[in-house]
Amino acid sequence: MPGLPEWTAPDKPAELTYNRLIEAILDGAFPPNSVLPGERQLAEMLGVTRSTLREALQRLSADGWVEIQQGKPTRVRDIWVEGNLNTLAALVEHHAFMPAAFVPQLLEVRLAFAPAYTAAAVEHNGQAVADLITDLTGDLSDKPSAFAAVDWTLHHRLTVLSTNPIYTLILNGFAGFYERMALLYFAIPDSRVSSRRFYADLGCAAAASAARQAREIVTEVMEHSIRLWEQATGPRE
């Protein structure tokens, strides 16, 4: 099949076979709704045994990348329609292959979730939120890396303090990717200025246990973050 990379036998066969097939799907070598080559041919292409290939394919199936049916060719799923949270987690690991619009779309998802978990955290644990913000921002330097670390810790703790563990589980899926994207975002000087103001305003709302105000503050800063990102990187495709 044209366009496929030159593969060699991997050191960790099942794991690397899984990752190589994901990359082949994401770069269009195996487009959505196409079928994979037969097991023997695909194993030879990948330089692995058929048992190793089967192990990788079973994981790809569970994670929403392919559909395996007895007696039928393995179909590549349209991940944007048929994927699941496991698919999303794998996408985060393969961020080099993501479409340009993925980050602003992810920011829109954060806009949908962050005001809710922040308001819940302030409602249930307002003083703890206020103390957290004081601890995190007391000597915050103006380096993008410092802001990225603080922002991740703050939002992670807000999900915990919201008392709804589902928020934490969702956010955990983005742990490494979140910080990488935050480094790019906080390289924008206006983003650091905006976040300092956000932390101060949220700290005041939390100390007053003003959950509705906290929701409004987060909504405003999330909307502003999308505008800043698009100003810095250009409109999404």
Image (tube, helix red, strand yellow):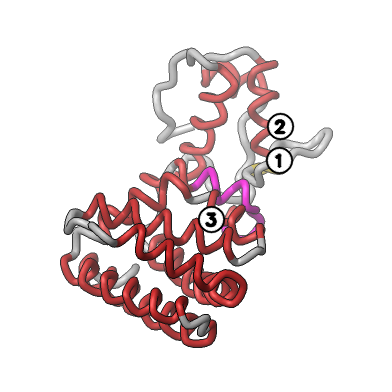
- Pick whichever of labels 3 and 2 is earlier in the sequence: 2
Query: Which label is found at residue 58?
Result: 2
Marks 1 and 2 sit apart, C-alpha to C-alpha, by 6 Å
Image quadrant where residue 62 sits: top right
Amino acid type, mark 2? Gln
Element type at mark 2: helix
Can the viewer see residue 225?
no
Q: Are marks 1 and 2 in contact (CB under 8 Å)?
A: yes
| Residue at mark 1 | 62
Marks 3 and 1 sit apart, C-alpha to C-alpha, by 21 Å
Residue at 71% x, 32% y is: 58
Residue at 62% x, 52% y is: 85
Q: Are marks 3 and 2 in contact (CB under 8 Å)?
A: no
Residue at 51% x, 42% y is: 25
Can the viewer see residue 210?
yes
Q: Which residues are magenta?
A: 80-91
Residue 92 image position (x, y, % from top left):
47, 47
Residue 173 image position (x, y, % from top left):
54, 49
Residue at 24% x, 60% y is: 186
Whether residue 233 is situated above or below residue 169 in the rendered picture: below
Query: Which label is found at residue 171?
Result: 3
